Image (cartoon, helix red, strand yellow):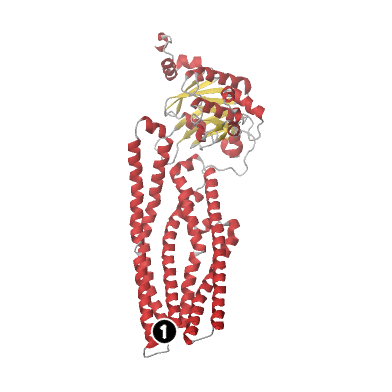
C-alpha cells in the first residue's frame, strides 16, 4: 500500500527530501539553545562583565535565527510536498475511475467514490505532511534532548528515562483503543455522503411528496452516528492531556527537587542553576515530542484506513481491456448479436439477456420496444462495450467488439440517454463535446437536425447562452435535443437514442426522425422508445420481453402477428379499430 501511495509523490521528491533535512537542522539548533542558555545563566550567577553576556546573547540570537529559518523552509517545502502529493493522488484516483467499466463503477457506490476522492485523500495528505515533518522532528527531538541532558548532567537525566516508558505505555494504550473507532467512521462517512447526494439529486421529488422531514431525520441519523463515534474517539484522546500533564509535572518536581539538593544540599556545587534550567527545558521538549508522536499515531491510524480505501480504487482493474492488437477502424455500422447471454455479475441469480440473435444492416433505422425491465438499455450497452457479454458475441462492422480499441469503438457509437447530462458552460461548449473542433456552421447544422436551432436562437445570447450545471435552466425537451445535437456532431456510424425523445412532443419527434433519414442516411439508428409513433416507420422493430427477443419485424408485420406489440399500440391509440384487438 505504501509503495502504491508513494507513486503519487513524483515531481515532489525534492521538497519531500528537503523537508526532513531542514527539520533535522532545526531540532539540532533548538537542542543547542538550552545548553547555551544554561551556560549564560551560570556565567551571570558567577559574575561576568557585559561583554561576556553580549557574546552569549549574540550566539543565542544567531541560533534563534537559524532555527527560525530552518523551520520556515521546512514548513514551505512540507506544504509544497504534501499539497502536491494530494493533488497527484486525487488525479490518479479520478483518472482510474474514468477508466472503469460500468461493472467496476457498480462495485463502488457514487458516495463512496466521492468520500475517497475528498475525505480520504485529505487524510492521506495531512498524514504525509506529518510524516515528512513531525515524524522526523519528534524522534529527533527526543534523541537529541536526551543526549544533551546526559551531557549536561547524567545522574539527573535518568529521571527522563524512568518517566518516558510510563508516557509511552499510556499513549500507546489510548491510541490502540481509538484506532478501531476511526476505522468505523469512514464507512459511516459513505452513508452520510450517500444521504446528501440522494437528497440533493432527488430534491424535486422530495419536495413534491413533502418528505423534507423524513430526509432530515435520515440525515440526522447518519450524522449522529458519525458524531457519536468521533465523541468516543475524542474522549479517549482527551486522556492524552492529563497523562501529559502528570508526566511533565512529575519531571518538573523531580528535577527541581533533586536538582535543588545537588545545588544547595550536601553535594553542593555538583550542579549549577543553569543546568537545572536546561534540564527542565529538555524534559519539556521530550514530553512534547512524545505527545506529538501520539497524535501522529492517531493520524496515521486514520490515514492507514484511508490508504486502504484509496488503494482499493487504484488496484481495481477495469473489467474491459483492449486486446493485444486492437482494431482501430470500424468498417460500417452493421450490428450482429450472436447467441448473446448477459448478466450484470457472476453472483446474479438471473440473466438480464438470454439467447439474443439479431442482425442489423448498416444504415438501417431500428426501433426497440418493450416493457419496463425488458432489458432494452442493457441490450444497447453491449454495442459500445460498456459491458462485456457473458456468453456469445456482439459484432459491429463484422468484428467482435472485444477486438476493437475501446476508444475507437466508442467514438463510432453515439448514445443519447433519456436523462443525458449537460455540463456547466455555454451551449457551444456543450455541443463541442461531440467534436471539439466543430465549426459554428457544423454546430448549427447539428442543432437543426435535432430541432434545437430554433429555441437556441430564441435565447438572448444564442449559442453563447450559459447552461447551468445539469442543464437546470433549460426544459427537459430542450435538454434532450441539445444532447441529440451533441451526439450528431460525433458523426458516428451508430446512433442510439435511449428513450431520448420522451420529453418532446410527437411533432418534434417526427421532425427529428425525418432529419435523421435525410441528413445521416448511412448511420445505423437504434431508437428505444415507449411510443409506437417513434418507431413505426423504422426498417425493423425489435420487441423485447423479459430479456428475450419476442419478435422482429416491421410495424405492419408486428401489428398483425405480435400480441405484445398490438397491446402497446392499441393502448396508445384508443381510436383504433376495435376488431383489430381480437
Residue 14, can we see it?
yes
Residue drawn at the location 55% of the way across and 49% of the way down:
91
Residue 207 figure quarter: top left
Give the x, y percent position of residue 97. 52, 45
In this rendering, the answer to whether 101 lies above or below 142 is above
Give the x, y percent position of residue 255. 38, 79
Q: Residues within 10 Å of mark 1 (few under 14, many from 20)?
A: few
Residue 499, can we see it?
no
Residue drawn at the location 53% of the way across and 19% of the way down:
508
Viewer-nearest residue: 368 or 294: 294
Give the x, y percent position of residue 524. 59, 26
Residue drawn at the location 44% of the way across and 69% of the way down:
289
Residue drawn at the location 39% of the way across and 55% of the way down:
183
Indicate left or right for 338 with 157 as reference.
right
Quadrant of the frame with the C terminus: top left
Residue 259 figure quarter: bottom left
Viewer-nearest residue: 514 or 340: 514
Indicate left or right for 249 with 505 as reference.
left
In this rendering, the answer to whether 104 lies above or below 2 is above
In this rendering, the answer to whether 115 lies above or below 440 is below
Q: Residue furthest front?
A: 50
**Residue identified by numbered label 1:** 155
- Element class at badge 1: helix
Viewer-nearest residue: 129 or 55: 55
Count of numbered circles in the view: 1
Indicate left or right for 214 with 422 as reference.
left
Give the x, y percent position of residue 545. 43, 26
In this rendering, the answer to whether 26 lies above or below 13 is below
Amino acid at each position: 500500500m505504501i509503495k502504491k501511495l508513494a507513486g503519487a509523490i513524483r515531481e515532489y521528491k525534492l521538497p519531500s527530501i528537503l523537508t526532513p533535512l531542514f527539520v533535522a537542522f532545526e531540532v539540532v539548533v533548538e537542542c543547542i539553545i538550552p545548553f547555551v542558555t544554561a551556560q549564560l545563566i551560570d556565567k551571570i550567577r558567577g559574575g561576568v562583565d557585559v561583554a561576556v553576556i553580549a557574546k552569549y546573547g549574540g550566539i543565542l540570537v544567531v541560533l534563534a535565527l537559524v532555527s527560525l529559518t530552518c523551520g520556515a523552509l521546512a514548513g514551505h517545502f512540507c506544504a509544497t510536498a504534501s499539497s502536491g502529493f494530494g493533488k497527484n493522488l486525487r488525479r490518479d484516483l479520478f483518472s482510474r475511475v474514468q477508466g472503469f467499466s460500468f461493472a467496476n463503477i457498480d462495485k463502488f457506490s457514487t458516495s463512496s467514490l466521492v468520500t475517497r476522492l475528498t475525505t480520504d485523500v485529505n487524510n492521506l495528505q495531512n498524514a504525509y505532511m506529518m510524516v515528512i515533518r513531525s515524524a522526523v522532528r519528534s524522534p529527533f527531538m527526543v534523541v537529541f534532548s536526551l543526549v544533551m541532558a546526559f551531557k549536561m548532567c547524567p545522574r539527573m537525566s535518568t529521571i527522563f528515562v524512568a518517566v518516558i516508558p510510563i508516557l509511552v505505555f499510556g499513549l500507546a494504550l489510548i491510541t490502540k483503543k481509538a484506532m478501531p473507532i476511526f476505522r468505523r467512521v469512514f464507512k459511516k462517512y459513505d452513508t452520510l455522503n450517500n444521504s446528501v447526494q440522494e437528497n440533493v439529486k432527488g430534491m424535486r421529488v422530495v419536495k413534491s411528496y413533502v418528505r423534507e422531514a423524513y430526509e432530515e431525520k435520515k440525515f440526522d441519523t447518519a450524522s449522529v452516528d458519525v458524531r457519536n463515534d468521533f465523541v468516543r474517539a475524542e474522549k479517549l484522546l482527551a486522556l492524552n492531556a492529563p497523562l501529559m500533564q502528570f508526566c511533565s509535572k512529575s519531571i518538573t518536581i523531580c528535577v527541581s527537587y533533586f536538582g535543588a539538593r545537588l545545588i544547595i544540599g550536601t553535594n553542593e556545587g555538583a550542579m549549577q542553576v543553569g543546568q537545572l534550567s536546561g534540564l527542565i527545558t529538555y524534559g519539556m521538549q521530550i514530553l512534547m515530542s512524545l505527545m506529538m508522536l501520539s497524535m501522529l499515531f492517531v493520524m496515521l491510524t486514520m490515514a492507514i484506513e484511508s490508504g486502504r480505501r484509496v488503494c482499493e480504487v487504484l488496484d481495481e482493474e477495469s473489467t474491459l481491456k483492449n486486446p493485444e492488437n486492437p482494431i482501430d477502424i470500424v468498417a460500417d455500422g452493421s450490428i450482429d448479436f450472436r447467441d448473446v447471454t448477459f448478466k450484470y455479475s457472476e453472483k446474479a441469480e438471473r440473466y438480464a439477456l438470454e439467447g439474443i440473435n439479431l442482425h442489423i444492416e448498416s444504415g438501417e433505422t431500428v426501433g426497440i420496444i418493450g416493457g419496463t425491465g425488458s432489458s432494452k438499455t442493457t441490450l444497447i450497452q453491449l454495442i459500445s462495450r460498456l459491458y462485456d457479454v457473458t456468453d456469445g458475441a456482439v459484432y459491429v462492422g463484422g468484428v467482435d467488439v472485444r477486438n476493437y480499441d475501446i476508444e475507437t469503438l466508442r467514438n463510432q457509437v453515439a448514445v443519447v440517454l433519456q436523462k443525458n447530462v449537460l455540463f456547466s458552460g455555454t451551449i457551444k461548449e456543450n455541443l463541442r463535446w461531440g467534436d471539439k473542433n466543430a465549426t459554428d456552421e457544423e454546430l448549427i447544422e447539428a442543432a437543426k437536425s435535432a430541432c434545437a436551432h430554433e429555441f437556441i436562437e430564441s435565447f438572448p445570447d444564442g449559442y453563447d447562452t450559459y447552461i447551468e450545471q445539469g442543464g437546470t435552466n433549460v426544459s427537459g425537451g430542450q435538454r434532450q435535443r441539445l444532447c441529440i445535437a451533441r451526439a450528431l456532431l460525433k458523426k458516428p456510424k451508430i446512433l442510439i437514442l435511449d428513450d431520448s425523445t420522451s420529453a418532446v412532443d410527437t411533432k418534434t419527434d417526427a421532425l427529428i426522425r425525418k432529419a435523421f433519414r435525410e441528413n445521416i442516411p448511412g448511420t445505423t439508428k437504434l431508437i428505444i422508445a415507449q411510443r409506437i409513433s417513434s418507431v413505426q416507420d423504422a426498417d425493423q422493430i425489435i420487441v423485447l420481453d423479459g430479456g428475450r427477443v419476442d419478435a422482429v419485424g416491421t410495424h405492419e408485420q408486428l401489428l398483425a402477428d405480435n400480441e405484445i406489440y398490438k397491446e402497446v399500440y392499441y393502448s396508445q391509440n384508443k381510436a383504433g379499430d376495435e376488431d383489430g384487438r381480437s
